[in-house]
Amino acid sequence: MDFSLHLVDLSRCGPFQRQVLATEHAIPRGRVSTYRLIAARLGKPTGARAVGNALAGNPFPLIVPCHRAIRSDRELGGYQGGSEMKRALLEKEGIAFDSSGRVVCGSFFYGEAGRAARSR
């Protein structure tokens, strides 16, 4: 089920967090992106950690599906509900994992092939 961002009062978030939440909200069910790609999409190519922090403080986890953001190396990264919950949510959306627990995907939402960023 998808919810509109218009259902929540984003004024309680700072400007950067509002941008991050809106960008994350646009990632469709069954797709993932990386903190780094989200940061780049927002014009902050070195802002992956800031994106992660903004998502960690997501006051609307039912509206903004922050479990769809992962690390560039395809590992899960943090999640308010814990890594087991993050993995379970992604699996319910059809995301596969390899034997080492990394996300298997052909491409990330917002760009790049689904491989470790440092392997290029």
Image: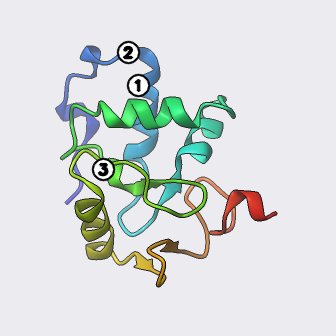
Write the residue at 53% across / 34% down. 49
Q: Amino acid at mark 1?
A: Gln
Q: Amino acid at mark 3?
A: Pro
Write the residue at 48% across / 71% down. 103
Position of 69 relative to 54 (above/below): below
Q: Which mark is residue 17?
A: 1
Q: Quadrant of the C terminus?
A: bottom right
Q: Where does label 2 land, which residue?
A: 14
Kind of element beneath mark 2: loop
Kind of element beneath mark 3: loop
Q: Quadrant of the N terminus?
A: bottom left
The reply to whether dot 1 and dot 2 touch (C-beta < 8 Å) is yes
Question: Viewer-proximal residue, 92 or 5?
Answer: 92
Instruction: Give how far across and how far down residue 106 sits, in percent.
Output: 60, 76
Kind of element beneath mark 1: helix
Question: Viewer-proximal residue, 5 or 82?
Answer: 82
Instruction: Give how far across and how far down residue 15 sits, in percent.
Output: 43, 16
Q: Distance from label 2 to label 3 (Cα)?
A: 18 Å
Residue 25's quadrant in the figure? top left
Q: Where does label 3 land, which residue?
A: 65
Left or right: 1, with 57 as reference point: left
Position of 88 relative to 97 (above/below): above
Visual colour scheme: rainbow
The residue most toward the bottom is: 99
Write the residue at 31% across / 75% down. 91
